[in-house]
């Protein structure tokens, strides 16, 4: 009896462990998009001809995208069982529908539209992938975009997310024409916005043509990973190294890709420490958005006349939806100032919520040695659609305190900030079950050994 009981417990324990692994998503999901035989890929260098794209850097976007696309083509054609086409190989103009028609004419399994970004006030930074809002192309784009952005994060870029945007002129369809035209012709497509060329933190990634080519090669390998391709020439076999594909359904839209145009729900600041002599000041920043992760924050010490440059919300992860809901911000206030401090929290759609204002009842002491001057460069603030002269921001640093996980909820469900994270609870319960089984198993083995000794006596 003892011999039968002990292996039985082992079997149950192994079953629980397998269930735990599957339920917690240890293994990557299968690719939703069905593809048989040779994969056909179309690379679409954005802009061209009279359409220059952004001109906010030392090179026109239409030239950057062509260099990147050509490098992507050269790298991808070294893989086996793939046919690769380009919508343009010269500086010519193409309508969006012409690009989609070309992809349809070659029976493309996927079209990748190559772009670089810029923002109106030169404040944004990071990389993002725009996907269609239409099933099943939303799921295809999300699965590609997730693993592609992971590779860009490893390069040091800030990830802004894999997301979609609805059109106001074409209700229920995509805002971006290349995605809309492609979906109309049943061609899966995404827009890869590599980085913001007009922001100092991203500008280091696009200094010259070699950088543009490096992006193209990275794009090619993301495509190869997504389709599980291999290359005898390169000695790479991505069919044995599957991409980190996330669960998705061909029949539904992935909730985390949906655009959140509502402002974050909470943004509060409180004073932790203040030294009027040294200028050292510590704040607690607490903010939450129940519909999407927080991405950036900025702050002002003059009541909103000028603002710091955008800073990354500490430890945020736009792919998993996790971010700290509270962190400590340490500032150094210039001497001779009586600050009025506010903070703004931005979500994944760049919509912000402004905090309460902290007022101070006395002026910070003036100090010698040049420390009354602010120390870092800042972005200009947007005010009445005009740029306000830039001011130097405060010396600052932050520390994370707590963590929030974004979990999409339906519009009918009331948002509850104190709701228990069900997934965490399940993890705890399953871990507890495993511990209990180990204890019982140990007890069974001990009893079995004791009985064995008694029989020998």
Image: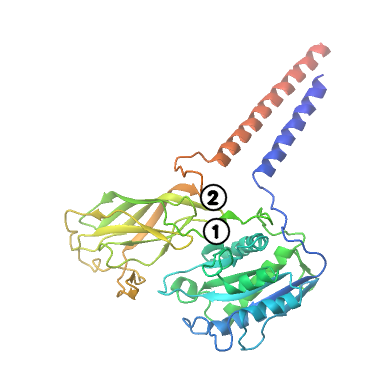
Read off the residue under disc 1. Answer: 258
Q: Position of residue 314 (x, y in %)?
A: 45, 56
Mark 1 vs 2: CB contact within 8 A: yes
Report helix, strand or loop for mark 1. loop
Q: Is residue 350 left or right of residue 248?
A: left
Residue most toward the left? 362
Read off the residue under disc 2. Answer: 408
Number of marks in the rendered image: 2
Residue in front for this viewpoint, 184 or 75? 184
Residue in front for this viewpoint, 247 or 136? 136
Q: Position of residue 250 (x, y in %)?
A: 69, 57
For residue 343, which quarter of the picture? bottom left
> Which quadrant: the N terminus?
top right
Q: Which residue is painted at 76% across and 77% down in the image?
A: 106
Q: Which residue is painted at 49% across and 76% down in the image?
A: 197
Q: Who comes first in sequence, dot 1 or dot 2?
A: 1
């Amino acid at each position: 009896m003892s011999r039968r009981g002990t292996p039985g417990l082992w079997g149950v324990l192994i079953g629980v462990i397998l269930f735990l692994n599957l339920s917690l998503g240890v293994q990557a999901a299968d690719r939703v998009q069905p593809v048989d035989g040779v994969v056909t890929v179309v690379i679409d260098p954005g802009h061209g001809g009279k359409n220059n794209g952004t001109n906010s850097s030392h090179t026109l976007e239409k030239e950057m995208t062509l260099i990147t696309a050509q490098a992507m083509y050269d790298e991808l054609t070294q893989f086996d069982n793939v046919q690769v086409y380009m919508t343009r190989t010269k500086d010519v103009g193409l309508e969006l529908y012409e690009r989609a028609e070309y992809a349809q004419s070659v029976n493309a399994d996927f079209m990748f539209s190559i772009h670089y970004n810029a923002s109106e006030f030169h404040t944004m930074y990071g990389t993002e992938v725009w996907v269609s809002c239409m099933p099943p192309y939303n799921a295809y784009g999300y699965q590609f975009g997730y693993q592609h952005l992971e590779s860009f994060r490893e390069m040091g870029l800030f990830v802004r997310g894999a997301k979609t945007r609805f059109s106001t002129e074409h209700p229920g369809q995509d805002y971006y024409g290349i995605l809309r035209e492609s979906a109309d012709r049943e061609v899966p497509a995404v827009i890869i916005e590599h980085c913001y060329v007009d922001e100092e933190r991203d500008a280091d990634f696009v200094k010259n043509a070699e950088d543009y080519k490096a992006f193209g090669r990275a794009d090619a390998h993301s495509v190869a990973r997504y389709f599980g391709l291999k290359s005898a020439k390169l000695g790479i076999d991505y069919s044995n190294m599957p991409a980190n594909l996330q669960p998705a359904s061909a029949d539904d839209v992935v909730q985390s890709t949906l655009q959140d145009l509502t402002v974050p729900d909470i943004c509060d600041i409180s004073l932790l420490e203040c030294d009027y002599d040294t200028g050292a000041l510590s704040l607690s920043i607490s903010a939450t958005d129940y519909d999407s992760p927080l991405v950036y924050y900025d702050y002002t010490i003059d009541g909103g006349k000028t603002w710091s440059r955008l800073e990354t919300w500490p430890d945020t992860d736009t792919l998993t939806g996790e971010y700290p809901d509270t962190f400590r911000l340490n500032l150094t206030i210039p001497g001779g100032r009586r600050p009025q401090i506010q903070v703004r929290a931005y979500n994944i759609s760049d919509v912000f919520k402004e905090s309460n204002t902290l007022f101070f009842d006395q002026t910070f002491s003036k100090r010698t040695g040049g420390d009354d001057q602010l120390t870092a460069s800042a972005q200009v603030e947007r005010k009445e659609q005009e740029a306000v002269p830039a001011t130097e921001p405060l010396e600052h640093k932050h520390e994370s305190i707590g963590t929030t996980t974004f979990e999409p909820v339906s519009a009918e469900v009331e948002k509850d900030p104190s709701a228990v994270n069900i997934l965490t609870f399940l993890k705890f319960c399953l871990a507890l079950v495993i511990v209990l089984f180990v204890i019982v198993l140990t007890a069974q083995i001990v009893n079995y050994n004791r009985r064995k000794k008694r029989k020998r006596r």
